[in-house]
C-alpha cells in the first residue's frame, strides 16, 4: 500500500515506512444533499446535509487538484474570496467546513465536492481517465493544447444562470436574489447561489465532460443534438441522487416505495432554483410537473407525439430524460416486486408505513438499479456517431454497448429502455423492428464482391498493419493524464499516417465508413498537396471492461472526421461527416462502424431544413445580437 | 448612438431647413399614385420613411372616406423627413384641397416604441394644427389608470434607467463590445433631439389627450365582440392582442414550454431585487445601501485595492489581498491563462435584460383585423407582436352578430388577404405554426416596413468597426412569406424593387409610399 510521503528532513535518518499512515483513498466533505432549501423545511431538514466522498488527492488552496481548480473571483462585486485550504488539519479533521450559505469558502468546497463526485462517476463507468475539451489557440497554428484543469468560478455572474464555457475552459456559476413573491416558499429577495445546488454543479460538470468526450455534440445539426447535451447532463445529476443513502431512504419512506407516481425529490432537479424564480416547482422533474391551473403537482403521462412539436432544447431534452427515468423505474419495480410481495403477505400492496428494513432493502435496490442505468448511459457514449447525434442513434448506442457487455440481460434492462423510449416516440431511423437485435448497430457484413470470409481477413490484416495492439500497449502504462494525452496524440498522428500509407487497404475502410480516405478523392472533400484527402483521427480511446459472464472485453474506439462541401439549391454548404470504429482487440476485428458518411443528400437537406426552421428555437437574441459567443449561456438563461 | 441621417425621398437639398410650403405635397409624391384603380374597397398605404411603421388605411365608403392611421414612427430619421410624411398623410386626406382640417377617423398606436410613435413627437405641430382625430385606439396595456399596468410599466422604466446607467458607467468603456448590443436596442425607447427631446412615453400621452379631447379614447382588449365603427359601414374590426394573460405578454421565445408550466421570463425571474442587484454593480450607491446586494458580507470580500467611499478615486493597497496575491498570480492573473478570465462575462445579464425589455414592449402590440362583412376579406395589422402575443390568439374568440357559435380568432387568419408583417420581418415575430401557416388565402399580400440599411448598421461592432447588424429580414421567414404570398411580398425600403407578382396584384409604388388596393 502506498504510504504518505514526509517532507525530506535534514536529518539522515531514513523514513520508517512501517509506522507511516496509509494514503487515504477518499476525502470526506460535508455539503448540501440537494441545495440549501431543504434545510429550512422540517420535513427534509434531517436529510438536507450529506457527506460527499471524493477520491483522495493532494490539494492546494482553491481547491486546486488534478482535474479542477476553483478560482473564486466575483466580477460584479469586483473582489476575490479567500481560497479554501481543504488540506488544513482543522478542515480535514471535521470532514470539511460546515455547510453555510454565508461562507464563500464553504461554497468553494461544495463546488469542488460535487464536481469531483461527478468526474469520479464518469471515470468509473468508462474505466479510464476523463479529459476536458482541448483548446485550439486562435492563430496559433493547428496545435491543440491539453487542458489539465477545468476552472470553476463559484460566483462568476450576478444572475439566475450557470453555464459551461468552452471559450474559458470554465464553469461559471451565478447568484441572484429570489423572487419577491412570498408565495414562492422562499425568503423573498434572499440570495440564491447556483453553486450550492448539487444538481446545477453536476449538470454543468457533465456538460464539460461530455464536451471533452464528443466535441461536436455542441454543433446543432438536428433538433436532438443540443437537447441530448442537456438531457445527458440532467441524467447524470438525477441518478447521482441515488447515491445519497439518507435521502434515498427518506424519500422511499415518504413515497412508500412508489417513486413513479408521487412527487419526490429524487426525480427533481434544482428545486431551490426553480422555486426562487417563482415557478412553484423544481426547475425540472422527470415524472411530473406543476400545473399552474390546478395549482398542484401532477404526474406527466408520456405522449408519443410530444417529441414532434417540442423543439426547444430543454423541453425536448426533458422528454429524453423522462424516457431514461421511466426505464429506471420499470427496472426498479421489477427488482423490488418480490420484496413487496414478501412484506405484504403476497398481495404486493403494503399497508401503512413501510418497515425500516424494507425501506433499506428498497433503497439498496433503487441505488443498484440507478447505478446500472447510469453506467449504461455513460458507456453508450463510446458507441455514438461523432457528429449529428439523434436520440434514436443514442438508443442504438446504448443497446449495443449493453449487449456487448451483458450478453445475458437477466433483469430485462434493455427491454425497459426500448419500451420507455417507444412510449415517447423516440425511434431510430432505418431500423426494421424495435427489437434488441435490430437496434444493435450493424456489424460490417460480407462484401458481395469479395469471396466469403475475405472481408474479415482483410480488415484483420489492416488492423495488424496499422499495429493497433502496439499502439494500445504504449498507452496502457501511462499514469498521469498529461502523459496519456500526449501519447494519445502521438497514436492519433501515427494512425493517420498508417491509414494514408495503407491506402490500398484503406479502401475497404473507406467503403465501410463512407468517408474518403484514399487518393481517389470525390468532389467536395479537401485535398492535401500530395493528393490525399483531408481527414482527422479525432479520438482514440481504449476500454477494458468485464462482461457479465466474467470475461474481459478489450476494445478500442477510433473516431474519424471529415468535412465536405455540397451544393444544394444553388448554395454551397459545409457539412461534417465522421465515423466511430469499434474494434475488438482480442479478436482483431472491427465490430461496428458507426457513422455518417459523405454525400448523404438526405441528411444535408434535413440539416438545412433544421437550421432554417422558423420554429427551430432561435430567439430574439439571434435577431439583434447574431450568433452567440457562449452557446450554453443563452441556453441556460432559459433552463439551468 | 450613431444616428445616420437618411434622406427619405428623392429630394435634393433635404438637409436644408427649407420645407415645402404647407399644403403642398412633396414633389414626386402625388397623393394618388399613378396606376391606382378608380374604384376600390380599401387602400393600405405603407410609407417608406425608414425602419419604422406608418400606415394609412383608407376605406372610400361611397364618397365619405374613412381614414385610419396605424402608427407613425421611424427608428433613425430626421424630424423634417417625418414631418413631410405626416404632411403627406394630411394632403392625402384633404384630397388636393389646401385648407381645412384633415380628419383621421381612427388613430392607432400599437405599442410604445420609437419606430412606431416618433412621428407624433417629430411632427407634433402638424398633428395639432392640421388634424382632427375621430378616436384614438390603444392596447389595454397602455391604460395607466390601472395599478397593475402601471406597475409593469414602472418596472420597465427602471430597467431602462438601469441599463442606461450601465452604459454610462466606466464599466461600459472597459467592457467594450460587450455592451454595444444594448445600445442599439435601447434606441427603441430612446428620446433624442429629432423628437424635440420628447420621450416616446410623451407621444403616447399626447395621443391619449387627443383621444380624450375627441371624446373617444379606447383601450382595446382582445376577444370581445367585433367593433362596429360609426362611419365605417360593412367593416368589422377585431382586436386579437395584446393578450390578457400576463404570462403570454412576457414571452418571446419560440417554445411550446411556456404554454405549460415552464414559463420563464427574465425580468420577473430577475425580479426587482435582481435588477437592483445588477444596478448596484454599476451605479455608485451610498456604502451601506450597496452592501445589501453583495453576496457576502464585507469581511469576506477581498478587493485588490481599497477605495474610500467618500472619494472613490483614491485607492490604497488592501493588506488582505497580500495574503492571496500568490494564489491570484498563479491562477487568475497568470498571463498564460488569460483566456480564462471572466471580467466581463457577467455583463451578459444586461444584454438579456435589454432583450426582455424590448420583447415585452413588442408583445404589448395592439393587433387589429379589419373584416369586410360581406366578402369576409381580412386586413391584418399585428404591430410588432411576438410569439407570446401570436400564441394567445389560439384561445381568442369573438361573439359575432348572427352567429350562433363564437368565432375563433384563427378564422380571421385564414381569410387574411393583407398582412402587415410584424417586427420588420424578424425571426420570431411571425409565428409559423398557428400563424403564417393558417394564412391560406390565395390572394395574400404581405407588406414589410423595413429599411435594410438601418437594420444593417445596428448591433455590436467588430474590430474594424463594422456592425454585426440585425437579422432583418430573417431569410427563412422571408422565404416562407414568399411561399405563402406567392412572392407578393413588398418591403418598404426605397431600394427594394416592387416584385412583379405584387404589381400584378395591383400594388402600386412611389418613392414615398406603397399602396395596396382591395378591389
Image (cartoon, coloured by chain):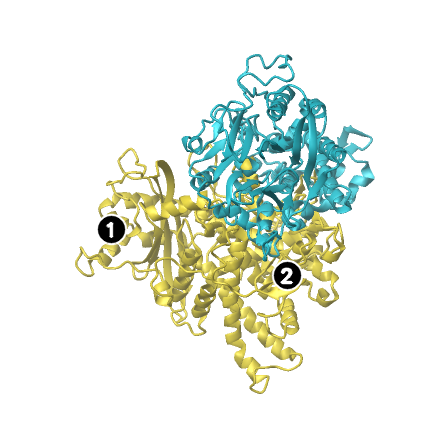
Chain colours: A yellow, B cyan
The residue sitting at 49% across, 67% down in the picture is: A327
Left/right placement of residue A607 relative to residue B378 reads: left
Q: Which residue is mark 1?
A: A508
Q: Which residue is mark 2?
A: A291
A77 or A608: nearer the viewer? A608
Residue A135: % across, % down: 48, 41
Do pointers 1 and 2 mark residues of a single chain?
A: yes
Residue A484: % across, % down: 44, 49
The residue sitting at 59% across, 82% down in the picture is: A349
Instruction: Look at the numbered disc 1 and give the secondary structure of its residue.
Output: helix
Q: Can the viewer see residue B304?
A: no
Instruction: Look at the numbered disc 2 and give the secondary structure of its residue.
Output: strand
Indicate which disc residue A637 carries. Answer: none
Residue A238: % across, % down: 57, 61
* Vertical placement of residue A45 versus A482, above or below: below
Q: Nearer the viewer, mark 1 or mark 2?
A: 2
**Mark 1 or mark 2, earlier in chain:** 2
Structural crowding at the residue carrying mark 1, measured as other residues with C-alpha within 10 Å and reported as few (<14), some (14–19) or many (≥20): some
A618 or B420: nearer the viewer? B420
Q: Residue furthest front?
A: B62
Residue B172: % across, % down: 66, 30
B294 or A177: nearer the viewer? A177
Amino acid at each position: 500500500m502506498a504510504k504518505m510521503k514526509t517532507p525530506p528532513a535534514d536529518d539522515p535518518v531514513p523514513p520508517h515506512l512501517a509506522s507511516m499512515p496509509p494514503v487515504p483513498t477518499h476525502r470526506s466533505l460535508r455539503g448540501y444533499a440537494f441545495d440549501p432549501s431543504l434545510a429550512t423545511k422540517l420535513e427534509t431538514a434531517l436529510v438536507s446535509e450529506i457527506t460527499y466522498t471524493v477520491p483522495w488527492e493532494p490539494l492546494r488552496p482553491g481547491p486546486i487538484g488534478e482535474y479542477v481548480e476553483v478560482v473564486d473571483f466575483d466580477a460584479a462585486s469586483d473582489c476575490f474570496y479567500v481560497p479554501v485550504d481543504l488540506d488544513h488539519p482543522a478542515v480535514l479533521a471535521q470532514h470539511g467546513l460546515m455547510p453555510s450559505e454565508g461562507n464563500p469558502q464553504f461554497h468553494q468546497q461544495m463546488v469542488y465536492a460535487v464536481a469531483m463526485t461527478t468526474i469520479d462517476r464518469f471515470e468509473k463507468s468508462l474505466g479510464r481517465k476523463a479529459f476536458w475539451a482541448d483548446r485550439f489557440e486562435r492563430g496559433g497554428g493547428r496545435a491543440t493544447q491539453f487542458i489539465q484543469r477545468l476552472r470553476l468560478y463559484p460566483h462568476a455572474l450576478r444572475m439566475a444562470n450557470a453555464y459551461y464555457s468552452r471559450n474559458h475552459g470554465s464553469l461559471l456559476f451565478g447568484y441572484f436574489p429570489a423572487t419577491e413573491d412570498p408565495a414562492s416558499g422562499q425568503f423573498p429577495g434572499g440570495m440564491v447561489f447556483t453553486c450550492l445546488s448539487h444538481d446545477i454543479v453536476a449538470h454543468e460538470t457533465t456538460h464539460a465532460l461530455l464536451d471533452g468526450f464528443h466535441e461536436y455534440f455542441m454543433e446543432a445539426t438536428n433538433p436532438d443534438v443540443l437537447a441530448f447535451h442537456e438531457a445527458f447532463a440532467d441524467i447524470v445529476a438525477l441518478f447521482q441522487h441515488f447515491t445519497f443513502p439518507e435521502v434515498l431512504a427518506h424519500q422511499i419512506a415518504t413515497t412508500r416505495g412508489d417513486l413513479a407516481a408521487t412527487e419526490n425529490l429524487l426525480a427533481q432537479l434544482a428545486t431551490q432554483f426553480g422555486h426562487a424564480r417563482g415557478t412553484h416547482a423544481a426547475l425540472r422533474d422527470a415524472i411530473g410537473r406543476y400545473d399552474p391551473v390546478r395549482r398542484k403537482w401532477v404526474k406527466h403521462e408520456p405522449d408519443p407525439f410530444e417529441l414532434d412539436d417540442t423543439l426547444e432544447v430543454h423541453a425536448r431534452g426533458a422528454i429524453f430524460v423522462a424516457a431514461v427515468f421511466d426505464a429506471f423505474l420499470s427496472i426498479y419495480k421489477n427488482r423490488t416486486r418480490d420484496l413487496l410481495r414478501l412484506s405484504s403477505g403476497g398481495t404486493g400492496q403494503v399497508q401503512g408505513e413501510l418497515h425500516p428494513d424494507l425501506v433499506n432493502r428498497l433503497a439498496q435496490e433503487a441505488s443498484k438499479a440507478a447505478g446500472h442505468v447510469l453506467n449504461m448511459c455513460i458507456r453508450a457514449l463510446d458507441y455514438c456517431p461523432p457528429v449529428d447525434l439523434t436520440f434514436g442513434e443514442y438508443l442504438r448506442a446504448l443497446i449495443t454497448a449493453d449487449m456487448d457487455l451483458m450478453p445475458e440481460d437477466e433483469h430485462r434492462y434493455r427491454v425497459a429502455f426500448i419500451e420507455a423510449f417507444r412510449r415517447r416516440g423516440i425511434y431510430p431511423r432505418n431500423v426494421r423492428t424495435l427489437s434488441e437485435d435490430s437496434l444493435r448497430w450493424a456489424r460490417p457484413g460480407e462484401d458481395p464482391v469479395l469471396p466469403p470470409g475475405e472481408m474479415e481477413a482483410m480488415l484483420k490484416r489492416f488492423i495488424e498493419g496499422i499495429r493497433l495492439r502496439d499502439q494500445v500497449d504504449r498507452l496502457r502504462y501511462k499514469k498521469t493524464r498529461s502523459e496519456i494525452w500526449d501519447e494519445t496524440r502521438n497514436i492519433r498522428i501515427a494512425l493517420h499516417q498508417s491509414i494514408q500509407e495503407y491506402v490500398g487497404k484503406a479502401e475497404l475502410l473507406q467503403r465501410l465508413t463512407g468517408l474518403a480516405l484514399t487518393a481517389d478523392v470525390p468532389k467536395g472533400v479537401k485535398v492535401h498537396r500530395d493528393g490525399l484527402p483531408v481527414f482527422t483521427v479525432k479520438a482514440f480511446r481504449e476500454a477494458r471492461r468485464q462482461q457479465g459472464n466474467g470475461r474481459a472485453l478489450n476494445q478500442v474506439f477510433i473516431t474519424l472526421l471529415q468535412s465536405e462541401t455540397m451544393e444544394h439549391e444553388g448554395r454551397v454548404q459545409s457539412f461534417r461527416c465522421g465515423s466511430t470504429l469499434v474494434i475488438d482487440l482480442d479478436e482483431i476485428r472491427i465490430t461496428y462502424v458507426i457513422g455518417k458518411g459523405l454525400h448523404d443528400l438526405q441528411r444535408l437537406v434535413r440539416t438545412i431544413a433544421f437550421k432554417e426552421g422558423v420554429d427551430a428555437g432561435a430567439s430574439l437574441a439571434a435577431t439583434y445580437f447574431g450568433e452567440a459567443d457562449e452557446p450554453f449561456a443563452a441556453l441556460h438563461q432559459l433552463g439551468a | 448612438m450613431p444616428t445616420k441621417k437618411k434622406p427619405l425621398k428623392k429630394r435634393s437639398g433635404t438637409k436644408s431647413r427649407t420645407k415645402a410650403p404647407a399644403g403642398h405635397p412633396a414633389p414626386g409624391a402625388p397623393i394618388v399614385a399613378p396606376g391606382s384603380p378608380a374604384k376600390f374597397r380599401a387602400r393600405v398605404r405603407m410609407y417608406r420613411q425608414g425602419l419604422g411603421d406608418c400606415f394609412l388605411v383608407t376605406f372610400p365608403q361611397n364618397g365619405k372616406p374613412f381614414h385610419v392611421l396605424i402608427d407613425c414612427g421611424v427608428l433613425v430619421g430626421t424630424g423634417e423627413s417625418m414631418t413631410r410624411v405626416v404632411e403627406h398623410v394630411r394632403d392625402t386626406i384633404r384630397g388636393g384641397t389646401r385648407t381645412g382640417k384633415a380628419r383621421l377617423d381612427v388613430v392607432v398606436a400599437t405599442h410604445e416604441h420609437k419606430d412606431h410613435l416618433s412621428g407624433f413627437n417629430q411632427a407634433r405641430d402638424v398633428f395639432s394644427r392640421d388634424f382632427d382625430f375621430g378616436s384614438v385606439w390603444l392596447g389595454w396595456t397602455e391604460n395607466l389608470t390601472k395599478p397593475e399596468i402601471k406597475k409593469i410599466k414602472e418596472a420597465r422604466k427602471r430597467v431602462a434607467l438601469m441599463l442606461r446607467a450601465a452604459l454610462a458607467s466606466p464599466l461600459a468603456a472597459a467592457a467594450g463590445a460587450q455592451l454595444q448590443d444594448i445600445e442599439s436596442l435601447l434606441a427603441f425607447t430612446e428620446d433624442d433631439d429629432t423628437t424635440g427631446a420628447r420621450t416616446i412615453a410623451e407621444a403616447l400621452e399626447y395621443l391619449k389627450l387627443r383621444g380624450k379631447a375627441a371624446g373617444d379614447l379606447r383601450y382595446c382588449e382582445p376577444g370581445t365582440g367585433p367593433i362596429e365603427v360609426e362611419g365605417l359601414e360593412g367593416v368589422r374590426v377585431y382586436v386579437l392582442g395584446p393578450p390578457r394573460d400576463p404570462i403570454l405578454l412576457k414571452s418571446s421565445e419560440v417554445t411550446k414550454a411556456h404554454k405549460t408550466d415552464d414559463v420563464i421570463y427574465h425580468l420577473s425571474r430577475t425580479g426587482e431585487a435582481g435588477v437592483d442587484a445588477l444596478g448596484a454593480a454599476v451605479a455608485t450607491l451610498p456604502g451601506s445601501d450597496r452592501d445589501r446586494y453583495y453576496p457576502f458580507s464585507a469581511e469576506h470580500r477581498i478587493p485588490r485595492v481599497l477605495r474610500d467611499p467618500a472619494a472613490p478615486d483614491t485607492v490604497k493597497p488592501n493588506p488582505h489581498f497580500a495574503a492571496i496575491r500568490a494564489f491570484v498570480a498563479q491562477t487568475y492573473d497568470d498571463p498564460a491563462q488569460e483566456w480564462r478570465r471572466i471580467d466581463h462575462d457577467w455583463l451578459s445579464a444586461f444584454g438579456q435584460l435589454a432583450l426582455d425589455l424590448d420583447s415585452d414592449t413588442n408583445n404589448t402590440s395592439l393587433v387589429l383585423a379589419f373584416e369586410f362583412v360581406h366578402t369576409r376579406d381580412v386586413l391584418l395589422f399585428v404591430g410588432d407582436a411576438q410569439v407570446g402575443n401570436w400564441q394567445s390568439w389560439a384561445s381568442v374568440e369573438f361573439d359575432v352578430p348572427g352567429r350562433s357559435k363564437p368565432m375563433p380568432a384563427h378564422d380571421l387568419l385564414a381569410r387574411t388577404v393583407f398582412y402587415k408583417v410584424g417586427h420588420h420581418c424578424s425571426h420570431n415575430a411571425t409565428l409559423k405554426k398557428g400563424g403564417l401557416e393558417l394564412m391560406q388565402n390565395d390572394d395574400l399580400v404581405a407588406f414589410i416596413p423595413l429599411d435594410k440599411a438601418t437594420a444593417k448598421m445596428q448591433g455590436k461592432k467588430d474590430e474594424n468597426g463594422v456592425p454585426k447588424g440585425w437579422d432583418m429580414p430573417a431569410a427563412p421567414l422571408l422565404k416562407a412569406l414568399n411561399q405563402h404570398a406567392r412572392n407578393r411580398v413588398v418591403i418598404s425600403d426605397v431600394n427594394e424593387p416592387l416584385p412583379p407578382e405584387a404589381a400584378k396584384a395591383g400594388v402600386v409604388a412611389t418613392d414615398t409610399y406603397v399602396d395596396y388596393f382591395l378591389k
